Image (cartoon, helix red, strand yellow):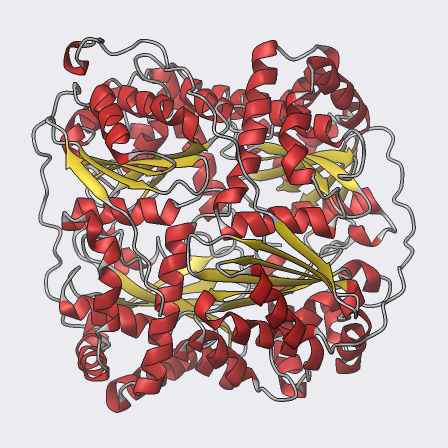
């Protein structure tokens, strides 16, 4: 087994901005990410979808780079950029030829220091976001399934259970003052990490980071509300109408143990036993062997969440199979795991595949033209949530150390009805969409 | 000495780009084995993985006249059994090697695409060779895949994004097989297992194949492994098929696919354009980048950033092997369909009428060459670039010369390309949405022909 070692250097600026560098001179490119520890989980109540709308506003101009300037400067340097909003973080990232590193840092620092937006920008991006929701959710068969459907059934606290893409009424209600307040509260340097990867020297990169970011004043530590869920004692079940697609779809989510615990590692292994393509037990049993489903697989957002999270299975039964029968077949798969455990000769290849997927993620992780996106993402997540970017070099060992007995013990604890939620997308009357 | 950073005011202008480091594309080892199999190897050793993609230069186009989609279902069933491995065994072997496998077919080619840990590279090559030579097409697996395909087709017909592409390709290509992006349910129901075997026997042949391997290996020992896995494979080369010509489109016409109650409209327009072999290729790609092919392009700034009609508008020059086509697309709210088409044509006509500015030109040249070269940094990016070169039979120095060719282009080149390929007067328009809400708007742009989601004329 060839072990991969990723060089990781890190420092913290006087204003609290954490900075991580990982040099790799194999190609003349750098990947840069600025991650803020704010996602849609703790966006303001009554402002569902705001964290994501705000992410759009970060592309609308800052003190020295007006509207479209940020995008133009990155594109015209030969690079790509984007931003995404998650449960517990929002990221902004660029992949550019390495001669544009300082330019990228200047742009990111400018918008961290002084976002400059007006009502017209806000109206414009509100319209853009509504079309994003329409194209991805409302006008798409199974749009938003199950990531928007499951949380309201699974969880009891508003931060974990609301509509993360946003109700249109809430998007309409958002004001410029909301944008400014959100920026002041969550977009301070001491609530962020800057990651720089690729064709760079770590010391030079740190000195550039210092030059551009260190004079941004820190803010008060943002409030971190308690988002932990009250103990669950019953199975939770919900149904959502499917307006376009002809088949029912089922999502089954089990709530994960807390991040970084021994049980969390074991749960990740369980996820890989159940899911992960055709060799996974769920797909194998339901699609290939019993042939009762068109589709059955699942997964978990492991590294980038820092609050209640579920391992989710998604099943699309054949039209002649009742959803209850499909769930019963799934339950039989779970029963096998809890009662008979997982033999070593199944666990070993599961771990080999986990290691391979981890490497693939580090190398690319988002299309073939965003090099080291995954490495950037993991370094940022390990810094924000675990305080240790070097976990990228040690975390694999902890997954590989999970023994069959650990996996079975955990299966008996978490793969139970009192720890799960089920949502069915039920097609509206046949032909209604025609 | 410069003043210390802490007392420096924030610079008001962006820092200049520093000296550029040249992009070094890895050396390729290119061989043709005695059986005709073309092999391309490129080392990329930053991560302990390899990707091995075996392409066959025959896809759905060669069977479109009697069994549309047959190449695709053949590829799906190829992974489900060989003379010596069951479906279960194949999936377990893959997991044991930390590998992923995809088998698929498009219009022009079929592929067995594997990637996995470098430590298992010879086992992975063996598996790819086994699938390409000894697939057994188990009856039960074929029936299962057929049934899944039928359910998949039903779902596709409820997706506005699928329907807009389907109708557009049908309009653009007429009797040419590129017109068909998916089979009908009746066509899938009529597939016979023997047809799949026949397609496999004819087309999965070494002289019709290209094997590209990228990753953490030494080319010399990789070549030896490939010789062991593929050297004894023998099969005749398939005949090159002939296809009817696509129609010439003159005058704007509109096709509307009616989906009652939809909350958004898919808009797609364009016309036939060129392949990568056309001398106009580079300037067309550059014109496209300025028009609608990048985030900072004119179309995106106009209908997204100024008007807020849409989330992800864009344009593209799409190259298939025999023909290419130009597209302009956006998903917009129902009330602004006419306004969107107006802006699309305005921006096309502006590209045709006036030279682009020096700043736009410089910016787009940098964008294209930078993003093109990003492919060198990952195994997947490198494989994508190499497959373009070798599947399309582009010159061997395509990767190395792309940059200088793009850098040499002028505003006149862009104008000439826009005039030839952004053919606004003869654009074919497809809209997918609720006819009650968009029919009148669409009719402003030409005669409208309407269809339902099943493809029936209304």
Q: Find residue A302 and report its image quarter.
A: bottom left
| Quadrant that contains the C terminus of chain A | bottom right
In this orientation, which residue lies closer to the viewer: A243 or B357? B357
| Above/below status of B53 relative to A204 | below
Left or right of B44, for residue B276: right
Is residue A325 shown above or below A242? below
- Would you say residue B429 is visible in this rendering? no
Q: Give the number of marks.
A: 0
Q: Residue at x 38, y 45 (%)?
A: A373
Residue A260 figure quarter: bottom left
Q: Residue furthest bottom?
A: A340
Q: Is residue A65 left or right of residue A432?
A: left
Q: Quadrant of the N terminus of chain A?
A: bottom left
Q: Residue at x 32, y 17 (%)?
A: A62
Residue A308's x, y, as percent?
19, 57
Closest to the observer: B214 or B28?
B28
Query: Where A178 falls versus B89 (above or below)?
Result: above
Q: Nearer the viewer, residue B91 or B309?
A: B91
Q: Residue A393: percent from the left, percent from the top?
A: 25, 56
The front one of A115 and B118 is B118
| Residue B409 visible here | yes
Residue positioned 8% across, 33% down in the render: A221
Q: Position of residue A419 (x, y in %)?
A: 20, 71
- Taking the image as shown, residue B223 lies to the left or right of residue B34, namely left
Residue B89, percent from left and from top:
52, 84
């Amino acid at each position: 087994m060839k072990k991969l070692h990723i060089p990781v250097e890190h420092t913290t600026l006087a204003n609290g901005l954490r900075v991580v560098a990982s040099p790799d001179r194999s190609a003349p490119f750098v990947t840069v990410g600025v991650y803020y520890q704010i996602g849609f989980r703790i966006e303001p109540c009554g402002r569902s979808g705001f964290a994501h709308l705000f992410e759009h506003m970060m592309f609308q101009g800052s003190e020295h780079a007006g509207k479209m300037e940020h995008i133009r400067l990155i594109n015209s340097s030969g690079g790509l950029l984007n931003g995404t909003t998650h449960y517990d973080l929002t990221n902004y990232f660029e992949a550019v030829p390495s001669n544009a590193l300082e330019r990228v840092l200047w742009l990111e620092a400018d918008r961290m220091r002084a976002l400059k937006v007006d009502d017209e920008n806000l109206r414009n991006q509100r319209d853009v976001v509504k079309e994003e929701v329409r194209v991805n959710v409302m006008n798409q068969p199974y749009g938003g399934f199950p990531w928007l459907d499951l949380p309201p059934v699974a969880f009891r606290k508003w931060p974990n259970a609301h509509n993360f893409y946003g109700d249109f009424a809430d998007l309409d209600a958002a004001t410029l003052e909301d944008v400014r307040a959100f920026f002041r509260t969550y977009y301070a340097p001491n609530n962020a990490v800057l990651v720089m990867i690729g064709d760079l020297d770590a010391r030079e990169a740190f000195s550039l980071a210092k030059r551009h970011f260190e004079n941004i004043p820190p803010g008060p530590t943002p409030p971190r509300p308690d988002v932990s869920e009250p103990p669950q004692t019953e199975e939770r079940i919900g149904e959502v109408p499917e307006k376009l697609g002809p088949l029912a779809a089922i999502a089954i989510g089990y709530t994960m143990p807390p991040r970084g615990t021994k049980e969390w590692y074991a749960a990740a292994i369980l996820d890989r036993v159940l899911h992960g393509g055709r060799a996974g037990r769920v797909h194998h049993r339901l699609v290939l062997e019993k042939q009762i489903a068109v589709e059955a697989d699942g997964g978990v957002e492991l590294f980038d969440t820092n609050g209640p999270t579920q391992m989710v299975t998604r099943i699309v039964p054949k039209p002649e199979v009742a959803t209850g029968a499909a769930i019963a077949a799934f339950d039989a798969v779970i029963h096998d795991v809890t009662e008979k455990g997982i033999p070593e000769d199944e666990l070993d290849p599961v771990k080999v595949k986990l290691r391979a997927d981890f490497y693939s993620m580090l190398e690319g992780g988002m299309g073939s033209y965003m090099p080291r996106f995954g490495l950037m993402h993991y370094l940022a997540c390990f810094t924000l949530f675990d305080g240790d970017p070097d976990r990228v070099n040690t975390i694999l060992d902890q997954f590989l150390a999970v023994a069959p007995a650990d996996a079975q013990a955990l299966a008996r604890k978490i793969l139970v009805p009192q720890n799960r939620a089920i949502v069915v997308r039920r097609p509206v009357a046949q032909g209604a969409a025609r | 000495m410069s003043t210390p950073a802490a007392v420096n005011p924030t610079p008001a202008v962006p820092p200049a780009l520093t000296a550029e480091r040249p992009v070094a594309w890895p050396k390729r080892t290119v061989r043709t084995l005695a059986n005709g199999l073309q092999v391309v190897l490129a080392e990329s050793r930053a991560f302990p993985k390899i990707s091995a993609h075996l392409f066959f230069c025959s896809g759905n186009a060669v069977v479109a006249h009697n069994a549309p989609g047959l190449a695709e279902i053949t590829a799906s069933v190829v992974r489900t059994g060989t003379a010596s491995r069951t479906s279960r065994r194949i999936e377990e072997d893959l997991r044991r090697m930390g590998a992923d496998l995809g088998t698929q077919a498009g219009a022009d080619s079929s592929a067995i695409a594997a990637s996995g840990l470098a430590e298992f590279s010879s086992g992975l090559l063996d598996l790819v060779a086994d699938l390409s030579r000894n697939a057994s097409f188990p009856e039960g697996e074929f029936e299962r895949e057929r049934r899944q395909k039928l359910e998949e087709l039903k779902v596709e017909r409820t997706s506005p994004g699928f329907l807009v592409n389907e109708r557009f390709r049908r309009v653009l290509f007429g009797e040419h097989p590129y017109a068909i992006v998916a089979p009908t349910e009746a066509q899938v129901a009529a597939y016979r297992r023997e047809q799949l075997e026949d397609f496999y026997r004819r087309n999965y042949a070494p002289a019709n194949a290209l094997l590209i391997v990228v990753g953490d290996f030494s080319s010399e020992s990789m070549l030896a492994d490939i010789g062991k896995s593929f050297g004894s494979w023998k099969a005749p080369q398939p005949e090159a098929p002939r296809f009817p010509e696509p129609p010439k489109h003159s005058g704007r016409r509109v096709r509307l696919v009616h989906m009652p109650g939809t909350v958004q409209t898919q808009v797609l327009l364009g016309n036939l354009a060129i392949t990568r072999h056309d001398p106009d290729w580079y300037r067309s790609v550059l014109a496209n980048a300025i028009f609608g092919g990048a985030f900072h392009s004119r179309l995106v700034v106009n209908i997204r950033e100024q008007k807020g009609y849409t989330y992800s508008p864009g344009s593209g020059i799409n190259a298939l092997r025999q023909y290419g086509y130009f597209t302009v697309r956006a998903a917009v709210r129902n009330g602004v369909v006419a306004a969107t088409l107006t802006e699309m044509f305005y921006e096309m006509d502006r590209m045709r009428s006036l030279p682009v500015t020096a700043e736009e030109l410089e910016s787009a040249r940098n964008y294209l060459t930078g993003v093109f070269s990003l492919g060198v940094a990952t195994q997947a990016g490198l494989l994508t670039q190499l497959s373009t070169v070798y599947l399309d039979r582009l010159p061997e120095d395509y990767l190395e010369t792309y940059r200088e060719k793009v850098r040499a282009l002028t505003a006149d080149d862009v104008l000439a390309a826009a005039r030839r390929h952004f053919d606004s007067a003869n654009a074919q328009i497809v809209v997918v949405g609720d006819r009650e809400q968009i029919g009148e708007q669409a009719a402003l742009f030409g005669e409208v022909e309407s269809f339902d989601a099943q493809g029936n004329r209304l």
